[in-house]
Image: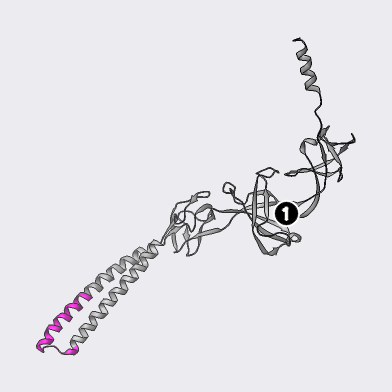
């Protein structure tokens, strides 16, 4: 009896299962076009020098990540320190003049009570004190301006992001408004260009499928963020918003599948496909095997581009 068990197991393993039948019907699907999109920052900003001078310190290099307000570089102008020293001396002189004018006014007021000094002389002393105080205030304001200029020598990052380029080196002479570094904002988008015939079809909010790096399959899904109203070189430009682009390089290119209309398509289950000697076949209910050309694999199934007709009954092997 035990000798029959291996024979029964072999018979069960070689008995064909009941094949599934699938009636093929044409379906309306989105027609997708494969385009190459480029990773771009939403905003690319410049860190500029606010004063002229010499770059005495560089705090960043290409590829560094910086926070908004962090120091990118320090620009120093030696003339500012000299001007502050000169103003300090003038402020001391103005303070002495103010103090003397106050003493003169106090003395004149006392003498006026005894009639030893005319009223006009007291008025002149009061005017001199007024002028001395305002001169001192103006000099202090000038010093504050120079102090602020020295503070503005620190070039701050205008936004959080990654440093793309550094345009200067330590010791370089810069002018006010000159670019010190270029930063890419943290948020990235995919920028794509489509032929202008698709301009009427592409809309903000449309879904877009993105392939992984170096791949052709769909890895993630994004949406069209902006469609620019200007045709450039016969192409319409659009930005696609996708989560998780932070690990891409700025300027890196990837495959994107964009909806450009609708078309009719035939689908079969992937398990129904027979591959033999490099040829793709499908078995019909009649028993015939037909050569087919396959397309992409979608949620509906495996697309058949040619060799199959609407209404055919496909039998899974």
Q: Quadrant of the N terminus?
A: top right
Mark 1, residue position: 259
- The outermost residue toward the left is 114
Any part of residue 77 in sight: no
Q: Nearer the viewer, residue 313 or 105?
A: 313
Q: Nearer the viewer, residue 202 or 252?
A: 202
Residue for point 13% across, 87% down: 112
**On the picture, is 172 further left or further right than 289?**
left
Give the percent coordinates (x, y) of residue 36. Answer: 69, 51
The answer to if 110 sits in the magenta stretch is yes
The answer to if 282 sits in the magenta stretch is no
**On the picture, is 64 further left or further right than 124?**
right
Q: Secondary structure at mark 1?
A: strand
- The stretch of residues the image draws in magenta is 98-120
**On the picture, is 155 further left or further right than 220?**
left
Residue for point 81% across, 26% down: 16
Give the percent coordinates (x, y) of residue 98. Answer: 22, 76
- The outermost residue toward the front is 1
Residue for point 25% across, 70% down: 92
Give the percent coordinates (x, y) of residue 176. Answer: 47, 65
Residue for point 79% across, 15% down: 7
Q: Residues within 10 Å of mark 1 (few under 14, many from 20)?
A: many
User: Please, what is the dominant secondary structure of the magenta stretch?
Assistant: helix
Any part of residue 7 in sight: yes
Q: Nearer the viewer, residue 203 or 125?
A: 203
Q: Nearer the viewer, residue 149 or 200?
A: 200
């Amino acid at each position: 009896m035990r000798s029959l068990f291996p024979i029964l197991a072999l018979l069960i393993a070689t008995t064909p299962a009941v094949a599934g039948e699938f009636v093929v019907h044409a379906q309306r699907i989105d027609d997708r076009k494969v385009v190459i999109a480029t990773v771009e920052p939403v905003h690319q900003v410049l860190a500029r020098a606010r004063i002229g001078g010499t770059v005495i310190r560089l705090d960043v290099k290409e590829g560094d990540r910086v926070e908004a307000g962090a120091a990118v570089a320090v620009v120093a102008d030696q003339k500012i320190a000299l001007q502050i020293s000169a103003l300090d001396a003038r402020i001391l002189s103005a303070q002495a003049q103010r103090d003397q004018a106050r003493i003169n006014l106090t003395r004149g007021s006392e003498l006026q009570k005894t009639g030893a000094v005319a009223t006009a002389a007291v008025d002149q002393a009061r005017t001199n004190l007024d002028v001395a105080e305002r001169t001192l205030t103006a000099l202090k304001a000038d010093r504050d301006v120079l102090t602020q200029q020295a503070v503005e020598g620190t070039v701050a990052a205008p936004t959080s992001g990654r440093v793309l380029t550094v345009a200067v080196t330590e010791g370089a002479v810069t002018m006010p408004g000159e670019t010190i570094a270029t930063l890419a904002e943290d948020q990235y988008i995919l920028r794509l260009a489509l032929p202008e015939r698709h301009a009427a079809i592409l809309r903000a909010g449309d879904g877009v499928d993105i392939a992984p790096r170096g791949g052709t399959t769909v890895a993630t899904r994004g949406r069209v963020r902006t469609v620019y109203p200007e045709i450039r070189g016969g192409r319409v430009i659009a930005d696609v918003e996708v989560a998780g682009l932070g690990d891409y390089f700025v300027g890196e290119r990837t495959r994107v599948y964009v909806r450009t209309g609708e078309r009719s398509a035939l689908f079969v289950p992937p398990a129904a496909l027979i591959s033999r000697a490099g040829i793709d076949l499908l078995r019909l209910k009649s028993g015939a095997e037909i050569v087919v050309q396959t397309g992409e694999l979608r949620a509906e199934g495996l697309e058949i581009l040619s060799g199959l007709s609407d209404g055919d009954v496909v039998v899974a092997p």
